[in-house]
Image (tube, grey):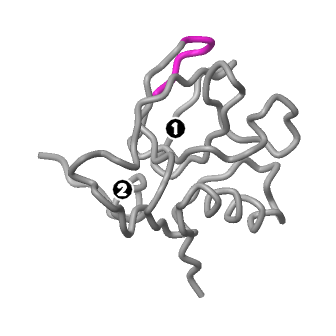
Amino acid sequence: MTAENIGTRGPKLGNLLKQEQWSHLGYCRKVVTAQETNATTYEIGTVLGDNGTEFVISDSTANDGSEAPAAIVIEKVELEAATDTDVVVLFRGPAAVADAALILDASWTGSEDDVYAALEALGIQVLRQI
């Protein structure tokens, strides 16, 4: 057994997901197809957009539909470059997530409220920590 420094652990689902209605039925979750140009790791809390073909990291400067946040990754996944990969996401509510656990593309810096509003339109309440 190896020791793991608590400060080096990756995000956990409990850090992100604070409430989910009918979790035992998977009502708010689904498996989507994701693909990125480069090899990428989706950590728990990564916000994705839907470009109409597959899900990708939501980028506010995109103009293919993926600029609108559409889902949140709820399990860590390694994606190979340009390869379709199944990813489990939270795509609707009723649910509540912690804002500090969301992982946003750098293009959203300063526009986090726009992401929160898009998620709340999906029924996913963003709990803001003070």
Farthest-out residue, left:
1
Which secondary structure dominates the residues rendered in magenta? loop
Name the residue nearer the viewer: 111 or 116. Answer: 116
Name the residue nearer the viewer: 84 or 79. Answer: 84
Name which quarter of the figure residue 3 lies in: bottom left
| Mark 1 / mark 2, whichever is N-terminal | 2
Q: Position of residue 121 (x, y in %)?
A: 64, 59
Q: Is residue 83 above or below residue 103?
A: above
Within 10 Å of disc 2 (Cα), the crowding (few <14, some 14-19, many 20+) is: some
Q: Position of residue 84 (x, y in %)?
A: 53, 14
At a point 69% along the width and 24% down the height, the residue shown is 52
Q: Is residue 129 above or below residue 42?
A: below
Q: Is residue 53 left or right of residue 76?
A: right
Mark 1 secondary-structure assignment: strand
At a point 55% along the width and 24% down the height, the residue shown is 34
At a point 52% along the width and 63% down the height, the residue shown is 101
Q: Which residue is mark 1?
A: 42
Name the residue nearer the viewer: 9 or 105. Answer: 105
Specify the amino acid type for callout 2. Answer: Leu
Q: Is residue 112 above or below residue 62?
A: below
The residues colored magenta run 78-83
Q: Is residue 92 left or right of residue 9?
A: right
Q: Is residue 129 above or below residue 31?
A: below
* Rendered-image quadrant of the C terminus: bottom right
Q: Which residue is mark 2?
A: 13
Farthest-out residue, bottom:
130
Q: Is residue 36 magenta?
A: no
